[in-house]
Image: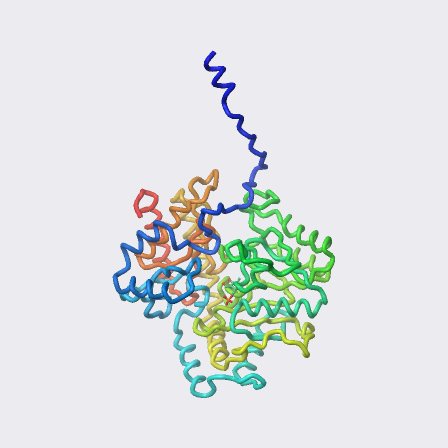
Amino acid sequence: MELSLAFARAPVKPRAPRRRAGYAGPTVRKDDEPDRTEGDINLSPARRAWAARYLGPETRRWLEADEACFLRQSLSTPCLNVLRGCEGIYLEDLEGRRTMDFHGNNVHQVGFGHPRVIEAIKRQLDALPFCTRRYTCEPAVELARKLAELAPGRLKKVLLAPGGTTAIGMALKLARAATGRFKTISMWDSFHGASLDAISVGGEALFRRGIGPLLPGTEHVPPPDPSGCPFRCGTECSLQCADYVDYVLAKEGDVAAVVAETVRSTPSIPPPDYWRRVRAACDRHGALLILDEVPHALGRTGRMFTCEHFGIEPDMIVIGKGLGGGVFPLAALIAREDLDVLPEGALGHYTHEKSPVGCAAALATLAVIEEEKLLERSRRLGELALERMRAMMARHPLIGSVRGLGLLLGIELVKDRATRSPAVEEAERVMYRALEKGLSFKVTKGSILTLTPPLIIEEAELLRALAIIEECLVEVGSGGG
Ligand SMILES: Cc1ncc(COP(=O)(O)O)c(C=O)c1O
């Protein structure tokens, strides 16, 4: 009797909505949860514990001074540590500890302080340190010619800018000018820089939230990433997201450009046919295709331009980051020759547009990439790393998946391979343990160890880094770390 009364009084639970297999819904962050999309967060208890254990008093004084004098922002306040040097694949902190840098903001294709880059910069500083607007200079012209020579097909016209964000802004303006349209289609979760125009086409909540109205006409579609995909393709992309781009282009009818990262740094690598389908959709609907390769062009994925893996030619490509040799802020928009349609307008005109020193650094960087055969190296070492990572996966249940293209590598940690629930705390502990053992990398989406070593890395150093990660997985898996 009592039992039935208790039963009658039991609160009625709302029925959970039915979910088709493979679809967990988008990851929605609660207000009190840290945002881990862009990287590991720097306010967690694990971070505080690591800092207390690892950083000495002088380092802490500098970190406090940094916080006191800079405007604070997520991800970089407080900073991780204080650097006093960097060379090759290594960072050196204030306390003299050397760490392999598998993060490097993706500026370090040729490593830090490559002698040829430094030499070219020093020579240029003595000859012509700045190029006033209205003038041009030899290194700028040589660089534009070199980029046009390297870029695929009809991409022959270049405009330089002091950063990837500004180069993306120039591409958006050129797309408007060339098509007479203003709308764009871009991807949720993408990143194209932190300015208002770039966050409008970008799709990361961390950058878009609470900042007010963004650019009108910036439509978003799901990225080719099966995790949380609304098309419910399960563990492998079914390319319905590519067909959806075609659908939105048709419905809108007047889209200027599709703007997207060829691959994401997460890393997330679309299936081989994805870009062919999107390219065809753009052609059908008169939209341009702008590929953002700011972090990954110049060899990260084993090709000079990442789109070469997918057998397509975009209408514009944006590169940056390592273009300045890991020293100078420099980016470039490379566009189809016939898109040179705004001679009377202003696309960029940034103060350091034709920086002779930046261009000299870029020319030296491209020479190093070619002469030291860094594209081949990136492909060879990337395959070796992936093979080792697959073997690690067979030994460690914490690893849910491994992925890579060239030396853009990722190890996803999961609590349980069946449910694929992300092992967020474990990933963070692995990262801090690895830092103590001399290896720095970023954790993306909360649980993906994202590894982007300099392309000049020696095989033995790469294997040492993977061994460090494995040691950390063992320690964390057995409750340590
Ligand atoms: C894909 C992508 N696009 C654009 C940018 C912006 O580049 P920058 O920070 O040089 O302005 C970044 C920077 O991380 C990026 O990763």
Between 103 and 25, the one nearer to me in the picture: 25
Question: Which residue is at the far left?
Answer: 57
* x, y percent for residue 373: 47, 70
Q: In the image, what residue occupies the spot 34% across and 43% down?
A: 477
Q: Is residue 145 visible?
A: yes
Looking at the image, residue 96 sits to the left or right of residue 201; the answer is left
* x, y percent for residue 206: 50, 55
Looking at the image, residue 94 sits to the left or right of residue 154; the answer is left
* x, y percent for residue 22: 56, 40
Q: Is residue 308 visible?
A: no
Q: Answer with the quarter of the image where residue 67 lies.
A: bottom left
- Display coloring: rainbow
Question: Which residue is at the far bottom?
Answer: 127
Between 272 and 44, the one nearer to me in the picture: 44
Looking at the image, residue 478 sits to the left or right of residue 71; the answer is left
Q: Answer with the quarter of the image where residue 334 lies.
A: bottom right
Classify 451 as above or below 180: above
Between 187 and 118, the one nearer to me in the picture: 187
Q: In the image, what residue occupies the spot 56% across and 30% down?
A: 15
